[in-house]
Image (spheres, grey):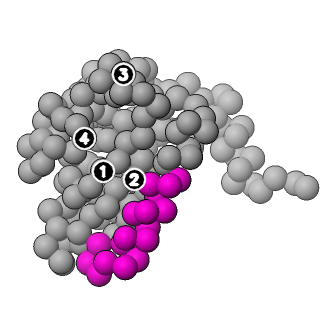
């Protein structure tokens, strides 16, 4: 069976692609976003407190609980008017942060939620709930301190 053109394009582009930033690079959100827009589909990175984090390959230890969490939030949003489930969605937060949590749930702006949407369809502001699946507690505390960055300036602590 011949692969779909889009899959083939992304695979070939990823093989030759050199990211415009590395783990640990420091920059502001606007610079990060401009560079991130140059990356191919499937490439993942996020900016937390001005520090770039590149995504690692995803194992079953991540994808299984991530899938369960996604199912729970999908069902909740389907049964709760005024909410929306946003898996793997970029959130434009403060001047130094652009996280991409595994799962997010928002209260829609028209229903009184705190986040909105940019004209190019990114989440602007903190979601009411954001979930980041980690293999161990050490993985979270040693790499990303979500709760003490300027993300808290958006009205709540996103991850703790």
Q: Secondary structure at mark 4?
A: loop
Q: Secondary structure at mark 1?
A: strand
Tell me which residue sits at (68%, 30%) in the image: 15
Q: What are the residue bounds of the magenta stretch?
A: 67-83
Query: Is residue 141 positioned above or below 110 on the image?
Result: above
Q: Which residue is mark 3?
A: 138
Q: Nearer the viewer, mark 1 or mark 3?
A: 3
Precedes in sequence: disc 4 or disc 3: 3
Q: Is 159 on the left or on the right of 7, as rendered? A: left
Instruction: For marks 4 and 3, give the CA distance.
Output: 14 Å
Report the magenta stretch's main SS: helix
Q: Which residue is mark 1?
A: 130
Evaluate whether residue 18 shows in this view.
yes
Query: Is residue 1 positioned above or below 158 on the image?
Result: below
Instruction: For marks 2 and 4, give the CA distance.
Output: 12 Å
Q: Are marks 1 and 2 in contact (CB under 8 Å)?
A: yes
Q: Is 68 on the left or on the right of 73, as rendered? A: right
Tell me which residue sits at (50%, 55%) in the image: 68
Tell me which residue sits at (47%, 31%) in the image: 135
- In the figure, residue 124 lies in which quadrant? bottom left
Query: Is residue 100 positioned above or below 119 on the image?
Result: above
Q: Secondary structure at mark 3?
A: helix
- Of 69 and 154, which appears nearest the observer? 69
Precedes in sequence: disc 1 or disc 2: 2
Q: Which mark is residue 159?
A: 4
Question: Could you say where residue 10 lies in the image, as x and y percent from the top left?
Answer: 66, 44
Magenta stretch: residue 101 in it? no
Instruction: For marks 1 and 2, give the CA distance.
Output: 6 Å
Magenta stretch: residue 77 in it? yes
Q: Which residue is mark 2?
A: 103
Q: Is 62 on the left or on the right of 102, as rendered? A: right
């Amino acid at each position: 069976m011949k692969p779909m053109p889009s899959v083939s394009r992304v695979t070939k582009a990823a093989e030759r692609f050199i990211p415009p930033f590395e783990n640990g690079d420091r920059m502001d959100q606007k610079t990060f976003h401009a560079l991130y827009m140059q990356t191919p589909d499937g490439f993942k990175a996020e900016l937390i407190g001005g520090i770039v984090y590149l995504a690692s390959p995803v194992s079953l230890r991540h994808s299984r609980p991530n899938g369960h969490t996604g199912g729970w939030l999908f069902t909740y949003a389907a049964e709760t008017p005024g909410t929306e489930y946003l898996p793997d969605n970029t959130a434009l937060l403060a001047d130094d942060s652009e996280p991409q949590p595994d799962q997010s749930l928002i209260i829609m702006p028209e229903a009184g939620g705190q986040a909105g949407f940019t004209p190019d369809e990114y989440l602007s502001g903190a979601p009411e709930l954001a979930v980041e699946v980690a293999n161990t507690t050490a993985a979270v505390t040693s790499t990303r301190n979500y709760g003490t960055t300027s993300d808290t300036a958006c009205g709540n602590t996103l991850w703790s």
